[in-house]
Structure formats: structure tokens, C-alpha cells
Amino acid sequence: MDWIALDKIEQLDEIQRLSHEKPCLIFKHSTRCNISSIAQYRLNADWDFSADEIVPFYLDLIQFRPISAEIADRFQVHHESPQVLLIQAGECTYDASHLDISVEELHEILGEKV
């Protein structure tokens, strides 16, 4: 899985723009949390989307807290850690946290068969 590092607030504009062409996923990861590490492992192990289907972004929210706060404000979601947000047409259409994060759920949300 080829994560794109999310390390600048300006990238959120790019994600919103790009999400009109294809869905974008933001994974907010706490490097200090075991559950977050498990969620990341499960995403990496089960990921079967091509680069043409979803663009995955990775946020180290410990290192980039202001970006995490901007994500919560901009997409009107409650901050969680770990958390995934699916961005489509500029809006957050799905978010999940902790062990509810799964590739299978993303397929269901996107209306695809696993």
C-alpha cells in the first residue's frame, strides 16, 4: 500500500479537489496507540484497492496535530484516533474509528463486492 504523507494543511485543499475525480481516504494514525497500530496493520494487510480506485493519505496526528484539528473542522467529524475518513466530491461521506476500520467496510460503502 502506497500511503501519501499528509503533512501540510494545504494538502486538504488538494484532497477535496481530487475527491471529485476519485475517492480519497485519510487515515489518522496515533504512533503512540496500540489500537491505531492494529488498525494500520489491518488496512495494509487487507488493502486491495488500486491507485485508480482510492487515493490513500496517512496523517501522523501526533506530529501534525493542527492538521488533525483542521480535518475535524473542515469535514465536520468528531476527532477520533485512529480514524479513517472517506472523502468524495469534497465531502466526508464516511468515517470510522478504532477497530471499526476495515477494508471490507470501505468496499461496502463504495458499493463494491469484496
Image: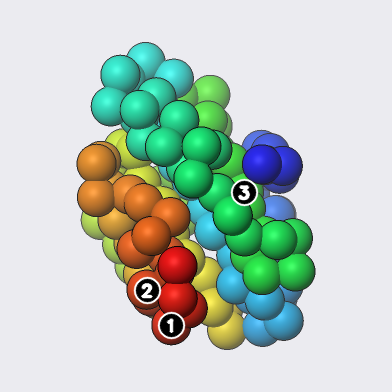
Name the disc covering residue 108, or none. Answer: 2
Tell me which numbered mark, 3 or 1, is placed earlier along the sequence.
3
Q: Could one spot residue 12 in this view of the protein?
A: no
- Can you give x and y, in whole percent of width and height, for residue 5 in the image? 68, 39
* Image quadrant where one finds the N terminus: top right
Would you call the spot at circle 3 few (<14 residues within 10 Å), some (14-19), or many (20 or more)?
A: many
Q: Nearer the viewer, mark 3 or mark 2?
A: 2
**Is 103 left or right of 7, judged from the image as shown?**
left
Q: Mark 2 near mark 1, Cβ–Cβ under 8 Å?
A: yes
Q: Nearer the viewer, residue 70 or 7?
A: 7
Callout 1: SS: loop
Would you call the spot at circle 2 few (<14 residues within 10 Å), some (14-19), or many (20 or more)?
A: few
Instruction: Give the residue type at disc 3.
Output: Phe
Name the disc covering residue 97, or none. Answer: none
- Can you give x and y, in whole percent of width and height, for residue 86 in the image? 47, 66
Name the disc covering residue 57, or none. Answer: 3
Instruction: Give the residue type at disc 1.
Output: Gly
Instruction: Give the residue type at disc 2.
Output: Glu
Query: What residue is shown with label 1?
Result: 111
Compute the Cα span from label 3 to label 2. 20 Å
Callout 2: SS: helix
- Can you give x and y, in whole percent of width and height, for residue 58 in the image? 58, 41
Q: Residue at x 62, y 60 (%)?
A: 49
